[in-house]
Image (cartoon, coloured by chain):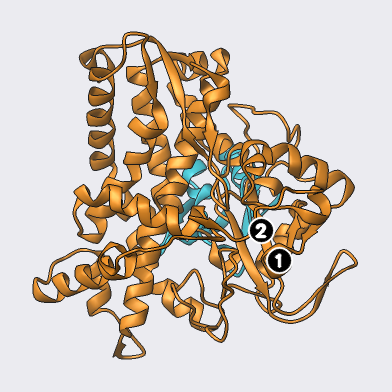
Chain colours: A cyan, B orange
Amino acid sequence: MRILLDHDKCQGHGRCYALAPELFESDDEGYSVLKRDGDVPGDLEDKARLAADNCPEFAIEVVE
Amino acid sequence: MQAVDNKPVRDWATDFDHTDPEYGARAPEIWDELREKCPVAHSDRFGGTWLPTRHDDVSRIAHDTEHFSSEGVVVTEWKPEDLAPIGYAPPITSDPPFHALARRLLLAAFSPKEVARWETTARQSCRELLDELLGNRGSDDTVDAARQYTQHIPVRVIADMLGVSREDGDKFRHFIHRVLETPGEVEENVEHEDTLDFYLERAIEDHRENPRDDLIGFLLNAELDGKPLTNDHVHGTIALLLLAGIDTTWSAIGASLWHLGQCPDDRKRLVEDPSVLPLAVEEFLRFYAPVTMARIVADDVDLDGTRMHKRDWVLLPFPAANRDPEAFEHADEFIIDRARNRHLAFGLGIHRCLGSNLARMELTVGIDEWMRRIPDFELADPGAVRWSVGQVRGPRELPLRLLRVADSAEAG
C-alpha cells in the first residue's frame, strides 16, 4: 500500500498527522509531509485509511 | 441598542435572519429543513444574503476565491467596499494573491508544535476556574457553565500569546459582543476609550515602547517583501487574533458540555475510557461547529441554478454542511467514537481556521479537566439555556446541576 498526498489540496488541517503520526508529520507551518516516502507497512494500513478518511480536503489517496 | 431590522421571519427559505433568537435556538433543525427543500435559502435582509446548506455547495464556495471574496466575513448592514485584496483584518479578510503572504506570516505561530507550548497554561486556567466555580456553587448544586467556565478559557491563553493583560477578558468579550454577536444593532454613545480601536492603539504603543517577545512584538518586527507591515495590517491582524479565538472556542466547549449534560452514556464513556477523547473532540466539532463565515460575491455566478449577483452576501454555514447526510453517515446522530469524520468545523480551502490547533487544544483540555473534576452532571433547566445569535453559535447561559464532584487530588 502507498499513500499519495496532494500538496495543492492540503490546507494544514492536521488530521492525518494526529491520527497516523507514523505516516505523516507536520512541517513548520502545519502542512502535512509524508514519512517513509508514502510507503505503508502492513501493520499501518488501517491507519493510512483512517487518515485518508478524515481529511476534510480529500488530499490523501490510498493506493492498494 | 437599536435594532435595524427586527421584523419576524416569515419563512426561513425566503426571509431567513441569522440574528433572530429562533435561529440561535434551533439552527440545526432549520438547516435540515432547508437542505431538503431549498437547498440555498435567500433573504433580502442585510442588502441580500444567501444561505447554502449542502456540503457540496459550502465546499464549492469556500474553494472558489475568484467568485467569492473574503472582503466581508461578517454579515452586517455595513458591507466593506474597495478593501480587497487586503481587507480590514488580514488574512481572514484577504483574497489571493495577498492572502498567502499575510497568512504565511502567522502559520508557524499557530502550528501544532507552537500551540503545544500553551497547553500547561490552558490546563492551569481550567483548574483555577473549576476551583472557583465549585467554591461558589449554590446550595442546589447548580452553576452556569457558560458564564463561570467556558467563556474564560480562551481569553487567558490568547492574552498571554499576544502579550496583553489577562485581566482585560471582560473588555474582549464586550468587543466581541459588539462586533460579532449583534450585527445590525448600533450601540450608541460608546466612548472612544471603550472601543477595540482604542484598546489596540494602546497595546501597540505599549509594545513599541517596551518591545517584547510575543505575537504583537512579532508583528511589529515582521516584514512583507522587505518592508515592515503597515500600521493598518498590524492593527487588523491583532484584532483578528483577539476576536476570532474567543467566542468561537467558548461556544464549542459550551455546546459540548450542553450535549454531555443530556447524554449520560457519553459522560460515562468519557470517564471510563478517556482514550476516546480525541475522537469525541472531532465529533463535538462536527456536530456543534460554532462558526459560520461569510463571503461577498465578487462576480455574478451560478450555484445549483441559482444566480448570485455581484456584491450579494453569502453565509457559509460550516455546521450545516457538517450535518449533510450526503457527506456523513448517520449525519444527524452524535457518535462519540466516529472514526470517519471529514468535518469542516474549521472551514475549507485557503482560509482554513488559522487557530484550529489552538481551538482543538483548548476544547480538549476544557472537556478533559471538567470531566476529571465533575464526572457527572445534567442540565438544570433545559429551557433556561440561552444560545447566541449571529455567525458564532454556542450557549451563553448554561445552567448545569452537578451530580458528582471529585476532589482536586482525585481529579489530578
Residue A6: assigned label: none
Residue in the foreground of this view, choosing between A32 and B297: B297
From the top left corner, tell me how far across and down residue B138 is, in percent. Answer: 31, 14
Q: Residues within 10 Å of mark 1 (few under 14, many from 20)?
A: many
Give me the residue at 30% from left, 55% from top.
B114
**Residue B242 visible from this viewpoint:** yes
Task: Locate residue B204 relative to residue B47 in the image: left or right.
Answer: left
**Residue B270, placed above or below residue B334:** above
Q: Is any part of residue A6 visible from this angle?
A: no
Label for residue B61? Answer: 1
- How far apart, in angstroms, are the residues tagged by discs 1 and 2? 8 Å
Which comes before the other along the chain, label 1 or label 2? Answer: 1
* Cβ atoms under marks 1 and 2 closer than 8 Å: yes
The secondary element bearing badge 2 is classed as strand
- Image: B131 above or below B119: above
Q: Is residue B338 left or right of residue B406?
A: right
Instruction: Identify which residue is drawn at 66% across, 40% down.
Output: B22
Q: Which residue is the extreme one toward the bottom?
A: B226
The residue identified by callout 2 is B316
**Chain letter of the residue beneath label 2 in the structure image:** B
Helix, strand or loop for disc 1: helix
Q: Is residue A60 left or right of residue B395?
A: right
Q: Quadrant of residue B283 in the image?
A: top right
Residue A64, image x, y percentages: 72, 48
- The amino acid type of the residue labelled 2 equals Leu
Could you tell me which chain the residue with mark 1 belongs to? B
Identity, as a three-letter code, of the amino acid under mark 1: Ile
